[in-house]
Image (spheres, rainbow, N blue to C red):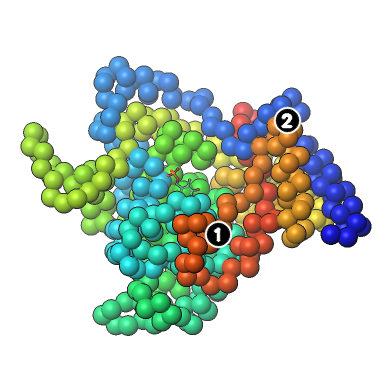
Amino acid sequence: MAASTEKRNSESCDLILDRLSKCIPARADNTPLHAPTFEGNEWLYVKDCLDTGWVSSVGKYVDLFEQRLSEYTGSKYCIATCNGTAALHMALILVGVKSGDEVIIPDLTFVATANAVAYVGAVPQLADISPVTLGLDPTKLRTWLDEIAELKPGVGTINRKTGRRISAVVAMHTFGHPVELDEILSVCNQFGLPLVEDAAESIGSYYKSKHTGTFGKIGTLSFNGNKTITTGGGGAILTDDAIIAKRAKHLTTTAKKPHQWHFSHDEVAYNYRLPNINAALGCAQLEQLDAFLEKKREVAQRYIKQFHGAGDVRVLAEPPGCRSNYWLNALILSDESGASLERLLQETNGRGIQTRPVWDLMHTLPAFLGVPKMPTPIAEAAAKTVLCVPSSASLGRSL
Ligand SMILES: *Cc1c(COP(=O)(O)O)cnc(C)c1O
């Protein structure tokens, strides 16, 4: 790198650091990327589980949590699971993905999305993202499928390059920002592909006033410790389809036939249920979700305001027509060399401000080297320019 460029980049990093530190409470000597808040009925509900002995995979909190999630998201049915990855695994089975199929997923996602595809013996087919949402780019997806896919009546959509059947599309709402669902659904319909929404990061996010995770045939949520609300570990399957919902419950409950004392199972299935003790946490967290969202929006506004007019960085904002939960705030640097990103990661983490880049792209991971993909230049650019910054609800003023 030329000396002058290097100097300019380092000056710009100092300015970014300065603006960033103004967004974070001065007293903090350690600011995590995303910490949970437990200020509601968590102790009360968990104690109730311990007092009554209902700690495991059945109990009133599981039912209550599922019911409240249904109400909150507007999804007809909700099946709680032990984590978001399990929910994704089930979703792929439930929409009919079979071993040897291909499933379209974004190159930029958390590894769970790709792993779930591998669990069912299918192969991920990687797609590029939009610079606006950082999620699947519908225009590129359509162009690519026009080029490689053929809809064969009675057979399905075949990838002409690999000969394999393409059997689903998984869209992920990156950092809580909704993808362009209307356009993605239109591509899915054109090619007869079911949409699964990996809404792990997007509880409380809306696309045109409808909750994310309720547009596809199935949506999945995660309640891992770093998500907007947490059950310790947990997830959920959302669907409006009664048959899928019934089968989801069955498959996540070791295919046990309901009976008071007989233990009989009618197929190989999974123990993916959410324990009652985790659901108890979830019920308490859900009661505070709207308050968390308000505070997270305030944190996002602080970043947006502080970086307004900064030429060499922009803050990822909610896409038009959407309301984002602002799960994780992301700065997008203009230096595409990756040098500024590396320097900022060093400086911030060194000062106790926890930051991180995006996940390593799926096509660079040993498990997924060589899987079929379209060119993914926007995902490649994101890997060198996106800096995720502290976003806990507790950073909001009104807490
Ligand atoms: C968190 C997350 C998941 C699921 O994670 P679990 O830890 O299994 O609950 C899946 N996909 C994405 C994009 C995520 O961020």
Q: Is residue 55 left or right of residue 383?
A: left
Q: Nearer the viewer, mark 2 or mark 1?
A: 1
- Going 56% across and 40% down the picture, which residue do you hit? 293
Residue located beneath label 1 in the image: 364
Residue sitting nearer the eye, 105 or 369: 369
Q: Residue at x 48, y 25 (%)?
A: 40
Q: Residue furthest right?
A: 4
Q: Which mark is residue 25?
A: 2
Q: Is residue 246 visible?
A: no
Q: Secondary structure at mark 1?
A: helix
Q: Residue at x 41, y 81 (%)?
A: 160
Q: Residue furthest front?
A: 366
Q: Residue at x 19, y 50 (%)?
A: 268
Q: Position of residue 362 (x, y in %)?
A: 52, 58
Report crowding for label 1: few under 14, some 14 to 19, many 20 or more residues within 10 A (C-alpha).
Answer: few
Q: Quadrant of residue 356?
A: top right
Residue nearer the viewer, 209 or 268: 268
| Residue 274 against residue 183 in the figure, above or below | above
Q: Quadrant of residue 235?
A: top left
Q: How many marks?
A: 2
Estimate the x, y position of residue 299 in percent, counting from the top left.
Answer: 66, 40
Q: In x, y percent, where is residue 78?
A: 33, 47
- Determine the secondary structure under disc 2: loop
For the residues marked 2 and 1, what is the alpha-carbon distance in whole angstroms? 36 Å
Can you tell me whether the CB of the residue at mark 2 lies under 8 Å from the nearest atom of ligand 1? no
Quadrant that contains the C terminus: top right
